Every structure is written in structure tokens, then in C-alpha cells.
Image: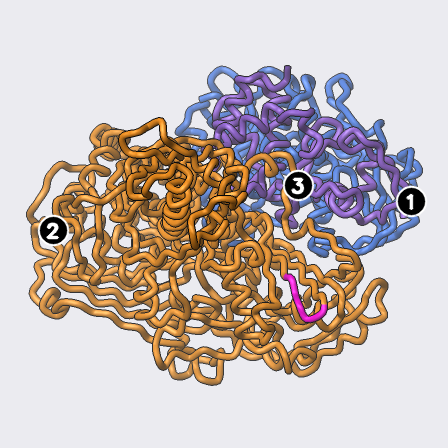
Amino acid sequence: MTATVDAPTAELGKARLRKEDAKLLTGQTNWTDNIKLTGMLHLAFLRSPYAHAKITRVDVSGALGQPGVIAAFSGADFAAEQGSLPCAWPVTPDIVIPPHPPMAVDEVRYVGEAVAVVVARDRYAAADALASIDVDYEPLPPVLDIRTALDPGSPKVHEAGNKSYEWVFANGDVDAAFSDAPVVLERTYRQQRLIPCAMEPRAVVAQWVGDEVTLWSATQIPHVLRFALSAFFGIPEQNVRVIAPDVGGGFGSKLQVTAEEVLAVLIGRKIGKPVKWAETRTEGNLTVHHGRDQWQQIKIAAEADGRIRGLSVDLLADMGAYLMLVTPGVPLLGAFMFPAIYKMDAYSFKCTGVFSTKMPTDAYRGAGRPEATFAIERIMDELAAELGIEPLELRERNWIKHEEFPYTTICGLTYDSGNYEAATAKARELFDYDGLRAEQRLRNERGDKVRLGIGISTFTEMCGLAPSRVLGSLSYGAGGWEHAAIRMLPTGKVEVVTGSSAHGQGHETAWSQIVADQLGVPFEDIRVLHGDTQVSPKGMDTYGSRSLAVGGLALVSACDKVVAKAKIIAAAMLEASADDLEFSAGRFSVRGDPEASKTIQEVALATFAAHALPEGVEPSLDSDATYDPDNFSFPHGTHLCATEVDTETGFVHIRSYVAVDDVGVVVNPLIVEGQVHGGIAQGIAQALYEEGVYDEAGNLVTTTLADYLVPSAADLPSYRTERTTTPASNRLGVKGVGEAGTIASTPAVVNAIVDALRPLGVQDVTMPCTPERVWRAIQAAHGQPAQGQPAQGSEQSGGMA
Amino acid sequence: MIPAKFDYVRPSSVGDAVSALAGGGEDAKVIAGGQSLLPLLRLRLAYPELLVDIGGLDELCGVTDDGDHLLIGARTTHYQLVHDPLITEHCGLLAQAAGTVADPAVRHRGTLGGSIAHADPAGDLPAVVLALDATMIATGPAGGREIPAGEFFVDYLTTALAPGEILTGIRVPKLGADWGYRYEKFHRTAQAWAIVGVAALVRRSDGHVAEARVGLTNMGSVPIRAAAVETAAAGAQASPEALREAAAGADEGTQPPADLHGAPDYRRHLARVLTGRALEAAAGV
Amino acid sequence: MTHITVTVDGVKYVDQVEPRLLLVHYLREVIGKTGTPIGCDTSNCGACTVLMDGQSVKSCSVLAVQADGSDVTTIEGLANGELHPVQRAFHEEHALQCGYCTPGMIMATTDLLRDNPHPTEEEIRDGLEGNLCRCTGYENIVRAVKRAAEAGVTQ
């Protein structure tokens, strides 16, 4: 596989310090909650204390007499105008998409659903007045376990029943693959419910002037939000401006059209004053969409030598109470990733989306792919144990070899590039894999109370969302392109407009590097604009590790157009033919006459002056471009994790963690490394710490950060990260990196825990692997050494036990 | 995030504080560092009508040498406990345990008296003062009185302080150099509450344990002394095996809670394991 | 209402405030110091960390009335013309991404280094246990603290 990659130049690959940092380091950041407008009023929402109930009466009148209160509304007050929050991904023709009013009117279906709102002069008064609103509920039975929610006698979340959809995919002869296979393993894995917990809680400000509205929101998707406000809530698109000011992290949680955004717009219109809502963390845990929450049944058929014959996956996915923006599609993003890096003859996938009386789920870092990667990498370890094959060896026997790219997988995806051998070899060496295996054997032989485990994750993912035609074939409601614009200013400086709205990713820096190379202008001379639909009117925003692999390529196209036009103008300035000019490092020169040249800045000034432009050439050096990728990008890598497991208490300590990622050509290694670090941490957090827990009445138990355990520096290890570089087949050779670490690390950690305990008979520990769960897993296995030699600790390979 | 309204006074003497508190009746509360109270106020889990802020009373701050005891002002912060040379010398267990409370910013504000008067059985310091055989000094409308730690913790978040009484100081017996100690805290993340904590003190003599004291965190509605362990350990050999054996009764008489982080049987198991470890560390074996 | 006098970033403010007003709301809403953000309601996240009389505190866990007479330093007052060494170290080690935890993380770091100018990696990690970051996985934050320590922040 050879990729066409533009020649490496000055900026690409440079560890530039970030342009974004200055204001963030000094407290000059413009978070949405910092915005103060004259006359601005504050909103506080009264939320349902019931998981499921009929609303029989709402009386907001008590709030109206309270100090500072301007107005109070119930859902009925919005009934005519509030419509339904959109679901953009009807994955099957017969999918059930229940109405989802931003504020509940007749019935509440999860704890935290908004039932009334107070509008007051300050946030203290708004909070106080909530207690003066009376709501009568008639409790209905909650639906909390999707494994029984489809049983005939189950209470219903919606009248139409608890099933939203069933989506299937199959390729190859699955029956044949399983029917006479020497080994068939079946496992059920639990992807617990996660709460994204971006550090910045959501906040919204809405201001109407005449029939135009400006909405500031801590959102990842200003463009999608503008479209949604117009398409679903009837505000003419040209009258809607959405601004995502500085946004403090998203991880998918701000990829949403939320009730509070819509209601702020509606209330602002009713009141005629700007309104603000700033979420508390407790509200956030209750009502920012949750992630994951699947039950995964996975079945693998293999030959005795470990070669995979087939794979079959049956998912139950908890939708929560409603379908939000991409709720039903999240598990489908994983559908194509269960086969991962492995070759096989047959694959079948089924996902059933089920309603429950919980907060809806939706995209959370990785969205579908971490779930898939977890299940396949876990069962590969189980298969290795079953067959007595060294787990890395088993993977190598099955993975796509580097010389086989491009390779079309059993899912029909064409992986354009990859080199799993190289990444694994590097990881193995950095980790001292053989040394740790030797230590593990010794400790197992001694019967140490603290066992050592080694966890492997040889992952890939599909990102760079996404080719529009593929999204169309999956019934997604929009395209996957991205927009960029370049404006050469008269003084030779450059404004770059991107539709990819960053919230921590460092676009301003990385985009400057790309443009600096393409236009040959200094890094410092470039300013990147984003996050305001009036400044950047077109875009598909930031999620799915798409910004560079899609938005970055749009940038290159836009630069091409500027250079092409500048070349015509330069040719006129040099009295040469444009065909005789070459462009390099920001300078147009006449081939064979290096003295005859003009810099792009000189061309920009001449364009501005417009005194001597060629016939028909307009006086501007601007361009815009959209890029629609023709394929996903497929980052991959090998992550290795060593855990020390205290068998007396169940406590897990991560002793070392090595990540070798291949994200293609790297624009800024500092930013890439940071993304990998943060991704690993979030994946470890799923493995060890985090779970959104509802009690038997449907109350969220983990409403605060005291109960929902986001790990701190003291809880996490240091990571050793390296890269291999297999360029992707796009002009920059870039893939994506935002989600890779999260996708890879969860199975690496859990595999390490199970690997440590397999000699004691443990086959699985449910996530998060809390000390109590680890301890119970050991107790359940009676603490007895498993029969025979632990496969993980031996060098033996091949053959069945 | 926003506390309900309350009235606020900042008295300039303990006497004024006691009067203010007594005048406020049942709906008055004392605030010192506020590190336990403020989260409750913000979540509107507490609705005092009056806060009596003793944060300005410097006489309640600091550690003094009082012969065979240390007298610790109720307002002494966790940070001060960690750094105070008298505490380190005579009562290192308290410094060690105080260093595990929450995080540095909370330790700058949070006070010893506050954690004890709050009487959260999951808090680290109640079990420690219990193991230390400390005495609580209370000042009320009727004057001062002393309450032994063993009688101070009455129920969940409930102490022997009478309405109108303020905890003003803690008297801790000095421990000689022959005492070893260990606060063994087990939690899922660094700033999380203890699932179980064990405060162990061991006096060694000739390779044996002459005396052991063990306080348990989060094993019931109040901090608990592991009496069975103390009895079993006294006179035992100072060896890991013997101390682990003594620790086997650590959960006797406890009624551990059930929550997200541990069911009662797991906590009982942890209490035994951690007590063994704490005793070993305290005995230096 | 209670009368308070607080010095914030070198400027003395005199105000009448409700007793229940949180210091962080005083900073943000009353005197416009929005550099200090709010990340949670249980004192866990540390985003609102400021220095009060030289020591780190979570400004959501202090009442404005309790700050009467104190000297408060926020992220906005840390730099003296150019970046403070801790701010510079965070920049150079790429120890921030979205930047929401950054003010609190930097204030906690300055306090950590005041208390312990040459911390080990473990001491750094323990010292920042009360500050949560969702972006960086803490790796570069730890490196930044080391770098700031090497630069001799306290001098």
C-alpha cells in the first residue's frame, strides 16, 4: 500500500505550543456562563423526582410571588410551540421514535426530566422559587432492566412498547462457521452506563432581537444546532445565530440538541429578555445524555490453531427514555468494529434498541467503537486461554498482515492502511513484555497475594466521520463533509474559517500548521475562526475523530484554490504565463528564473489594490471548500497494561501502561500525545471507576462527583506512548486520534485484571472492576487455582488442552 | 449549588458563640471551616436558619502541650495537624490520618473539631480520636464539660453535644515512643470516602504486643472500637501471623452500611484484612 | 446582608453580601472575576480553586462572608505582567486541552509547590488529588508541575 502524501514541510510534525493556551492559562476564557447581557434573566428548572409518572397537575403560581421571580412556566405553557427534540438517525424504517417534548407535559419518563421552569432576576432567586411550584404525580412503574423490558408483562415506557428497533447485519455463512467449529466460545459482557462529565457543565444564553435569535451554548455542534432550531422548531434559519464560545470539553456529551437549549430560546421569545441557564453538576449527571449501557452477547468460532472462523454478536442497547440526536445509531457505529483487525469467514450482528425509564444514552467518546473493541479483545483473550495459545500470538495469527492492505473486512469496510506487526513489536519492547511474563510466572508459582496481570488490546477503529454516502446508507439524517474557508488579508495575514468547532482539541494550532505549509505563510500570521455560525456559516462540527481527517482535508482544498488564484495574479505581476510558475514556501517563481518571483503576501497586497488584475479576475484571495471523505480512516495500535491485583482486598493498581498508536501522519505530536493520554484515562476510568447507577426505584444514585468517581492524578498511572506511522490514503496521510485511547484502553485494563486472576479460576470481572467486584470474582472462583497451567503465563502455543 | 437562605453571626468570643447558638435553637448550626457543611448546604440537604461562624475565634486554633496530654483547639485545621511538630511527636496517628482527609484544599479549611462534631462515621478522624482515647471539651450555656470519645459519638451524624454546646477542644493523651501507629484507609479513588478505615495503635514490649487500640471507620452508624481485636492482640507475639489472627475478629459487633462501594459482608472482610495490615504496620513487623 | 472587605488579586473590595453567597459566586458574579469557573457542587472537582491567604481553597466551599478580611488570589491575579512560571510550564508541557480545570489546577499547583518545592511524581499526583481534569489524563500536568518545580517557582 502506498499512500499519496504531500511532501513533508516545515510545520507538519512540529510540536508547536498551542495558540489557544494564552487565554486559558490566565482566566480570560469566554465560557458561556461568563456571559452577562443587559437585562439578562436566569432560568432554573424543576425536575421530575420520579422515573416514571403521569403529571396530573402543575401549579407554578406559588413561584410568581417569590422575590426576584419574573415568570414561571410548566410544560403545558409550551405545548403549542415546543415540538419534539430531534432524532437524526432513524436506523430502520420501522424504528419507534416517541415524541420527546423539551419540557414534559403529561408524563415523565426519567428522573431529572424538566417539568417546570422559573425565570428570575438572579440565579439564587431562581433556585429558591423552585420549592414554591406544586406538581402532582401519579407514579407509574419504572422500566430499569432492558433484559426484561421486552418480556410480555413488562411495564411500558411508551405506549408503543419498549422496543425501538432491531438492526441486523450479516456476511458470510455464519451457520457453517459455527456448526462444526473445533472451538466455540460464548460470553456476555456488560458495557455499563457512563456519565460523560465534561468539566464545563452545560450553559445556555438566548437573546432575541426582533425576530432574530442568538444562542450561546456550550455545545460541540453550533451548526447542527442552528439547523435543528430551524428545521424542528420553526425559526427561519437565516434568523438563527448559534455561538459556541469557549467550550470546556464535550466527549460527545455536547453533541446534542438539548431541552434546555430549545427552552431557553422559547422562553427568551416569550419574555422578551435575554435568558441564561447554567447547569449544576447534579443536573448534569441527571440530564446530560449518558453513554454506553449495552449488554453484549458475543460468540466466536475458531479452529484449533486459533484461526477465527466466525463471529456473532447480539446486542441489547439501552436507549433510555427517548431517542435523542444520534441515540439509536451509536451501537451501529460499533457494528462494523467487532471483527476489528481480524480476518474471518463469517460475521453476524444484531442490535435491539430498548427503552427504559432512564436518561437517554447517546454519543460518548468512541460511541459504539469502545464497546465493540472491548468485546472482541476480551473474547480474544478468552480464546487464547481456552486454546492455550499465547494471546499476542493468537492475535497475530488472525490479524490482517501489513502487506494485505488495502483489505476489505467481513463488514465490507476497506481498511486503507495499517501495520499491526510494527505497532505490536514496538509496544512489546517498550513494555518489556517477556520480562513481565517471566515475573508473572514466578509470582503465580509463589502464590503471591498480589498478582500481576498483563492486558492486551490490539485495536483499530473507524473514524473521520464520515463519507456522506455511507451515512446515507445507514439512514443518518445528514452528510459527513466539512467546510473550510481561507481569507488572505491585504497585509498577507490569513484568516482561516473552519466548520469544525473545537472545544479543547487545539484546532487553532493544528490548522495554523497545515495552512502555514500549504500557503507558505508564517504560523504566527494565521488566525483560525470557528464556533459562530455568523463567522463560520457552514460546518458539521466536531465529533467522531473527524476534525483533521475531514476538516483538515477541507482546509487543504481551500488552500489549493487560493494558491491557484494567486498564481494567476502572480503571473500577471511577473508578466509570465501561470503555467511557467512554480509555488514553493510561499513564493511564486518563474521556472528557470529564480530572480523573478513574488511572495504570496505581495500577491495579496496587489490583489487588494486591484490596480492590475488580469481580465476577469476578482479582487480577492479568498476561497472556500468542502471535503467529503471517500472512506473512514482507521487508526490502530497496540496497548499493553500491567496490573497488580491485591487478591485480599480486590484493589487494582496499574503498574505500567504502554500505548503505541498509529494515527497516520501527525500534524502536531504534542497535541496527538495529549489526546492519547486523555483517551487512555477515560478508558481506564470505564474499566475501574465509573458507572452511572440507578436504584430500584429509578433514581440516579451517582448524581455527584462524590459518587460518580472520575479519577484524579493520584488514581491514574503514567503512560508511555509511542507511535508508528502508516499514512492514510488521503492527501495529508492523516487519520484521527480523539477517540483512539478510550477505545483501546478499557479492554487492556480488564484483560490485565482477568489475566492476573485466571490462575485463581476467574474468567471475567464486570466493569467497573471495583475492589468489591474483583474480590467477589475471586470468592466465586473459590480462590482455587484453575486446572492445569495458566495459558497466559506459558510460552506454549498451538493445540488444544 | 445554591444554599437556602440563613442568618449569620460571627461572634468574637466563645461565650458569644454559645449565646448565639443557644439563642438560635435547633435550627442553628456552628460553622468553622465549613468543609462538611457547605456541600450539604449547596445540595440543600441541610437548612439551618442561623449559622454561627466560629472561624474568627483564634483561641480555638492550635496545639498546646499540657503535660501528659496535648490540647488541640477545635478549629485546628487538618493541614495544621499534619504539620504540627507536637502532633507528630506525641500523636502521629492523628497527623497521618488527617493527611488522608479529602484533598489539600479541603485540608486547609477543614478542622478537627468540625469533623468530629459532624460525626460522619465515614470521616477519618472520629475513629482516630476514638482509638486515641481522646476527650472532647464542650462549652455550653452551663459552662464547660469533658466527654470521653467513647461516649461522644451517639448515632449517625449525632453526638453527645447538647443543644447550645460547642466543641471547643480535644484533649489527646501523649503516646510514648514505644507506640506505633497506622491509619489504613481503603477507598476507590484518592478523594473518595473510606469504604473502611482502620486506626491502629500498638505498644510493643519485648517482641510482644503490650497493648493495642483499634478504631474503625465506616463500619457502623458511629466510629467503633474493635474490642475483640484489642483483647486478642494484647500479649500476642508481634508477628504478622499473630497479628492477622488477632485481626480476625475486627468486624465483631459492627453493623457496616451497604452502599455503591461495598456491601456489608465485603466491608466486614475488609475490616479484618485492613486491621491485620494496620496492626502489622503499627507494630513495625 | 453582611458587610465584607476582601482583597482580590491586589484590589480591595468592600461589599454587602447575602451570608449564603458562595465565594466563587462573589468572585464571578459580583466582582467579575470569571477566570475562576465552577465545575461541581460537592467540592470534588477543584475547578474553582483559589488561594486564600496563601493557601489553596475551593471557592465553592467558602462563603463570601468567611472570606471577610482575607487576601484572595485568583488565576487572573497570578501573573505579574508575564506568565507565572506555573502557567508557563502548563503551556510548555501542553498540560491543558479544554482549559476548564486549568485555573484550579494551576492554583493548586502553586500551593503544592509552596508547600513542597521539589515534589516527587507521587507527591505531585497526591497533591493534585482534589482537582479533576477530563482531557489530559494528567500525564502532562504532572510533567508541567515537575517543570515548574525545576524552574524554582518559589524564588
Q: Identify the residue position indicated by label 2 in the image.
A: A306
The disc placed on residue C48 is 3
Q: Which residues are magenta?
A: A210-214
Q: Viewer-nearest of labels 3 and 2?
A: 3
Compared across the picture, whether A76 is left or right of A799 comes to right
Q: Which residue is mark 1?
A: B20
Q: Are marks 3 and 2 on the same chain?
A: no
Question: Which chain did the image draw in purple?
Answer: C
Residue A571 x %, y %: 37, 41
Q: Secondary structure at mark 1?
A: helix
Q: Quadrant of residue A667?
A: top left
Residue A472 percent location from the top left of the image: 34, 69
* A78 on left or right of A579: right
Q: Nearer the viewer, mark 3 or mark 1?
A: 3
Res A651 visible = no
Name chain B's colour. blue
